[in-house]
Image: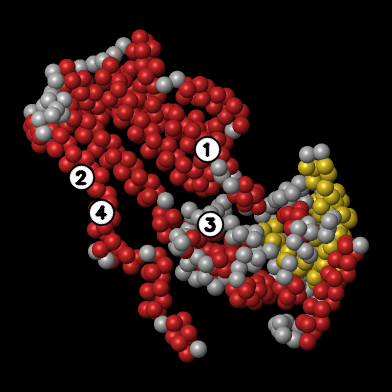
Amino acid sequence: MAKAITVGTDNSTRENIFKKISGDVGSTQFGPRIIAFLNTIAVPVLLLALWQILSGSGLLLDVILPSPVKVVKALFEMIKDGSLGVDLAVSGKRVLIGYLWGAGIALILGVFSGLNKIAERVFSPVINVIRQIPLYAWMPLIILWFGIGEVSKEIIIARGVLIPIYLNTLQGIKGVQAEYFELAEVLELKRSVFLRKVVLPSAVSSIFTGLRLGAGNAWMAVVAAEMLGGLTGLGYALMKSREFLWSDKLIALMVVIGVIGVIIDVILHQIEIRSLKWKRKAVK
Amino acid sequence: MGNTILEIKNVQKIFHTGDKDVEAIRNVNFNVEEGEFISIIGASGCGKTTLLRLIAGLEKKYGGDILLDGKRVEKAGLDRGVIFQDHRLLPWLTVEENLILGLEGKKEELREQVNIYLKKVDLENFEKVYPGQLSGGMAQRVSIARALMRHPRILLLDEPLGALDALTRMNMQTEIGRIREEEKTTMIMVTHDIDEAIYLGDRVVVMKPRPAEVDQIINIEIPRPRLRSGEDFAFYRNSIINIFNHSIMDYAI
């Protein structure tokens, strides 16, 4: 009995129990962190080793599979002569413009369709049909109409962005719990307040999922669009490397594309986490 | 006390589900005086919550009349505060933002109101906290503060303590009793806990199920503050249990 009372009133014990529950203890120790890190890098290290062994064995031609060292050298070369920077800037600008257009249109249509049954009936079937036609199937028509200049590339990117953002926004807004509609009735909330304070915040998670999927699509679409036409950008650099059999550059560019895709996703994810402050603070 | 604030006259509610009509409430009649605390008690699913939702205006279309200050209830509104079983605070808003949601006025004045009402529910200095950081009892107290801040004519509580553990529940019953003494707000509470109904109610409306009808209305004449362990408390508890036993027998036969 006496013991039970001490546990209940002793603050340090309670804090420890709390830490254990919330998993804080693990993060202050080194061991589990190292193991977690090893888990993460296991497959990449293995692949890298396999790559080194294969390329060094003489079984494969250098032009088919250059060694990792050669790829890194090619990467530094591209950085030094400035070509990577130029390609990145050009592709980045296209992605940004295409993404903003696509995301803007998708968000407006998505919010509108989520709030209004008629709007959903009007837009959803159209988006659904557009969705069924692969991005690559759109490209010839877009190029026929808009040429191989900037506009057509931006449209291709916007098209790639549109679908996931529209669908996720729509879903997020339609997912507002019925309980909150009752609350709005009871509190006599104005429509604008209800939209800002209830509907949008409850859809934020879903909207961010769309924004992140869209960003991934945008980055893929720009490379695809540049491979079809034009004389600049990462996609063009890829095609050129293939034509000249610069396999080391080619692989280096692929790595760059992958890494940047991950960075974009991480940034958006961080923004998402920031905007969901209340979730971080909740005691689970 | 003395003025009738709410009149419930021949109220009937039928739900149309598919091709079947289900009568949820039949011929309910009683009045509520200003400042009174009414407990409505009945078995789960007996329709007592439906009755409360009708008063709240969350269920539309009903037979008979529910008159609040003489005006027929047709939709929800700020003159009726509602406490749901879940606290129904918005998780992405702080306690303060939840309390002032939809209210208009100067920032300082609203903030002052927030402080006043948080003090009333014993949660001073909690205004910057998110609902997820609160315990169930605390969150429910915030939701009571939210309703009181809008100065409702009547407060409707729909099994407000149903999701809480037994100890918190008892503390919250005391708390609700205290708030009611201080605010003199008219309250109607739906519950399935006999002790809770007796502890808080001036009158206990006992309902029988399917469709919900008023079985008996019992005046609780125990002076406040009430003791749950008192003899008179036990007397009322037994009377209500007896009523339930009879209605269950009726139902079984």
Which residue lies under the disc numbered 2?
A: A45
For the point 60% across and 76% down, which residue is it?
A: B167
| Position of residue A199 measured from the top left corner of the image (x, y, whole percent) | 53, 44
Check disc 4: other Cα within 10 Å, few if <14, some if 14-19, many if 20+.
Answer: few
- Closest to the camera, between mark 1 and mark 2, is 2
Numbered disc 2: secondary structure: helix
Residues at circles 2 and 4 in contact by the CB criterion of under 8 Å: no
Using the image, name the chain to which the residue with label 1 belongs.
A
In the rendered image, the vertical position of residue A60 relative to residue B112, given as above or below: above
- The type of colouring in the image is secondary structure
For the point 50% across and 65% down, which residue is it?
A: B134
Comes first in the chain, label 2 or label 4: 4
Side of B99 where A37 appears, left or right: left
Along the viewing direction, whichever of B173 and A81 lies nearer the viewer: A81
Which residue lies under the disc numbered 1?
A: A171
Side of B189 where A117 appears, left or right: left
Numbered disc 1: secondary structure: helix
Which residue lies under the disc numbered 4?
A: A37
Using the image, name the chain to which the residue with label 2 belongs.
A
Q: Both on one chain, marks 3 and 2?
A: no
* Amino acid type, residue under disc 4 in the picture: Phe
